[in-house]
Image (cartoon, rainbow, N blue to C red):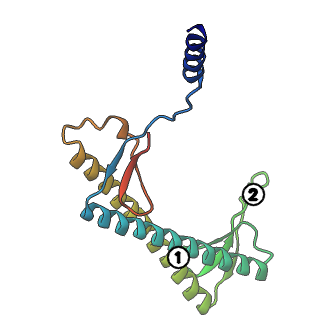
Amino acid sequence: MAKTSLLLFVTFYFITSLSCNAQALIPVIQLSASESADAKQISEKIENAWDREQKAEEAWRDFHDTFQKAHPEIHNLRFTSDYRSAVSLPGQGIGQVPPRASTVELTGDERKRLEALDREFKESSEALRKARRDWDDFTRKFLVNHFPDGNSGSWGSGITLTSDFRFAISRQ
């Protein structure tokens, strides 16, 4: 009997002394078919707009760098808003002499290219801003639909979607 009691005690002690490394559970909500479709569409819009903006930035940098190499005398290179000139923004003047900017007039092709690059950069940036606003609107609507009483609790930091767009996970 003593052996059985000792064995039961040791077994109980061993089982209860095992450390439990359970992780805290995070809230999850399954999306409806329409929510899933909307989330996927908005997510793709953001990804496409991000890619477009990155390409526009790269094309702008390439144009700037190519122009700079062709005109090493222009320091701190900037282009004018009318797309006609490249200017060197000067530093501080010496004494009472005001600083002067060096300028180089752009060719017709350079003007057209610069204007197209500027337009694409502005349009791509606006597309990305709009896609992000759409995402913010989607998440607000999603939370209101799932927490009509306004008590979203741990969902206050927003949501993350699974890659299959079936579940929303709290970003607590």
Q: Residue at x 25, y 64 (%)?
A: 34
Left or right, residue 126 beside residue 152: right
Question: With respect to residue 98, does 80 lie above or below?
Answer: below
Do the numbered discs 1 and 2 sit on residues whose CB atoms are within 8 Å?
A: no
Kind of element beneath mark 1: helix
- Picture quadrant of residue 106: bottom right
Left or right, residue 157 beside residue 66: left
**Towards the viewer: 31 or 18:** 18
Left or right, residue 48 beside residue 11: left
Q: Which residue is mark 1?
A: 118
Left or right, residue 170 beside residue 37: right
**Towards the viewer: 104 or 53:** 53
Residue 96 position in % (x across, y down):
75, 53
Q: Which residue is mark 2?
A: 97
- The quadrant of the image that shows the C terminus is top left
Identity, as a three-letter code, of the amino acid under mark 2: Val
Q: Residue at x 55, y 11 (%)?
A: 5
- Picture quadrant of residue 8: top right
- Residue with the most extreme top position: 2
Q: Residue at x 44, y 37 (%)?
A: 25
Residue 80 position in % (x across, y down):
58, 73
Q: Residues within 10 Å of mark 2 (few under 14, many from 20)?
A: few
Whole-angstrom CA distance, mark 1 to mark 2, is 34 Å
Identity, as a three-letter code, of the amino acid under mark 1: Asp
Residue 124 position in % (x across, y down):
47, 72
